[in-house]
């Protein structure tokens, strides 16, 4: 595939994914807020669970919620489903065009596990399907009857998946697959449970029958899961821009911290919207703040970093040799790597002056983050990373 054409496809899909994702998250957050903001009043119609008054855009809105369904089918009924479907479809298309099409660069890291391109793709696809199947079984089992037990089971499922991915794929490939698996669960909740259950309720109304209340409760359970998973999955999906998250030797534990922090923030807003005050809401955000501090410290600590003595600082010529051997196959005026027609981000390492001008990028991406070279395709060693880092921090002596 022509590199420029692939870039345009990537841009269009990414923009579409962003647009549909905003629409899905916006409607999801709105309806969870609405559900938690409903209040009862004495003269409500029969079957109405609660009502909410809102003001927006210069007008007032009055919304009622029927716990099961109204007595008759309304003339105009608005559905909210295509946002979820197209968010998943565009996200999956991005996964294919970036991580599967260029698996040797973005998905496979020989230092983690030597995989063929086809093996890596099949593992990725299989994991998305397996994640949904296991989650759905948990929800329908006796564990699913307890909110607390199900939350713990879902957390364990994602942590096991994260551990597996980080021991099979590259760091960025592992994190994107954690996010993709969670996103697949969320979209499948809409496609397989929420919308089908709503259609059954509508069909019962049209047939003059009383809808099954269990259908609404099951859909509500899955919708709540989607709400709590949204903030963690958002960070997972942009994690490829932050190597300090995915490059850690124990990055699967970082996934756990992200789940906890995102869940705490979402729980704060849900509790507050439900009318909680005082002790009910005072602890979530401070706890999330502590979690962020722990995350930053943990992600910044590398117990396996190579330690070098001060007298072992390499020369500029040695640094140039390392960079040109390990990095210049892509970052050059004439890249040798078939995946690039020009140097990524315009960064080139053809001479010492270019290396010095981009030293902080080298330090962040190749030394601290270990995100470069992509897939460590040139087999840059930990000692070489340490030598480069020490040379840069020492002021790049000659």
Image (spheres, grey):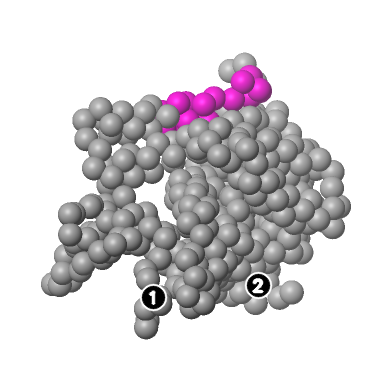
Q: Which residue does the image show at 18% across and 54% down from the upper left? A: 41
Q: Vertical placement of 157 versus 124: above or below?
A: above
User: Residue 7, image x and y in percent?
Assistant: 61, 71
Q: CA distance from mark 1 to mark 2?
A: 51 Å
Local crowd size for mark 2, using a 10 Å CA cut-off: few (<14), some (14–19), many (≥20): some
User: Residue 119, image x and y in percent?
Assistant: 84, 53
Which of pointers 1 and 2 indicates the residue nearer the eye? 1
For this orientation, the residue located farthest to the bottom is 75
Q: Which mark is residue 149?
A: none
Residue 34 seen in this snapshot: no
Q: Which mark is residue 72?
A: 1
Q: Secondary structure at mark 1?
A: loop
Q: Which residues are magenta?
A: 292-308
Q: Nearer the viewer, residue 305 or 167?
A: 167
Q: Nearer the viewer, residue 40 or 268?
A: 40
- Left-right relation of 288 to 160: left
User: Residue 382, image x and y in percent?
Assistant: 70, 30
Quarter of the image where one finds residue 184: bottom right
Q: Nearer the viewer, residue 306 or 44?
A: 44
For this orientation, the residue located farthest to the front is 209
Q: Which label's residue is closer to the chain start, 1 or 2? A: 2
- Left-right relation of 179 to 234: right
Q: Which mark is residue 6?
A: 2
User: Residue 322, image x and y in percent?
Assistant: 70, 40
Q: Which residue does the image show at 49% across and 49% down from the upper left? A: 221
Local crowd size for mark 1, using a 10 Å CA cut-off: few (<14), some (14–19), many (≥20): few
For residue 300: magenta? Answer: yes
Q: Quadrant of the C terminus?
A: top right
Q: Are marks 1 and 2 in contact (CB under 8 Å)?
A: no
Q: How many numbered marks does the figure carry? A: 2
Residue 169 seen in this snapshot: yes
């Amino acid at each position: 595939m022509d590199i420029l054409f692939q870039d345009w496809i990537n841009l269009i899909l990414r923009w579409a994914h962003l647009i549909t994702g905003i629409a899905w998250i916006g409607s999801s957050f709105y309806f969870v807020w609405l559900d938690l903001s409903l209040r009862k009043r004495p003269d409500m119609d029969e079957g109405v669970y609660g009502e909410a008054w809102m003001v927006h855009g210069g007008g007032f809105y009055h919304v009622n919620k029927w716990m099961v369904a109204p007595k008759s089918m309304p003339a105009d009924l608005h559905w909210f489903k295509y946002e979820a479907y197209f968010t998943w479809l565009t996200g999956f298309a991005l996964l294919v065009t970036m991580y599967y099409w260029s698996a040797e660069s973005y998905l496979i890291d020989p230092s983690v596990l030597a995989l063929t391109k086809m093996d890596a793709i099949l593992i990725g696809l299989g994991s998305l399907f397996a994640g949904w199947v296991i989650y759905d079984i948990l929800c329908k089992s006796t564990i699913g009857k307890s909110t607390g037990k199900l939350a713990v089971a879902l957390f364990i499922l994602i942590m096991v998946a994260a551990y597996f991915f980080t021991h099979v794929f590259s760091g960025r490939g592992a994190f994107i697959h954690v996010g993709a698996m969670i996103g697949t669960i969320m979209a499948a909740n809409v496609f397989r449970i929420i919308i089908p259950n709503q259609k059954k309720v509508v069909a019962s109304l049209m047939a003059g029958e009383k809808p099954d209340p269990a259908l609404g409760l099951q859909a509500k359970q899955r919708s709540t899961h989607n709400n709590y998973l949204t903030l963690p999955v958002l960070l997972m999906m942009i994690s490829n821009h932050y190597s300090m998250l995915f490059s850690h030797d124990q990055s699967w534990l970082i996934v756990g911290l992200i789940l906890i922090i995102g869940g705490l923030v979402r729980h704060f807003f849900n509790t507050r919207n439900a009318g909680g005050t005082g002790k009910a809401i005072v602890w979530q955000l401070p706890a999330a703040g502590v979690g962020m501090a722990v995350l930053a410290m943990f992600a910044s600590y590398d117990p396996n970093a190579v330690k070098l003595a001060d007298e072992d600082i390499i020369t500029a010529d040695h640094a140039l040799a390392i960079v040109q051997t390990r990095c210049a196959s892509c970052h050059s005026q004439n890249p040798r790597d078939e995946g690039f027609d020009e140097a990524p981000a315009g960064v080139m390492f053809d001479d010492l002056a270019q290396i010095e001008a981009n030293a902080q990028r080298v330090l962040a991406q190749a030394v601290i983050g270990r995100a470069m070279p992509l897939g460590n395709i040139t087999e840059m060693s930990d000692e070489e990373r340490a030598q480069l880092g020490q040379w840069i921090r020492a002021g790049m002596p000659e």
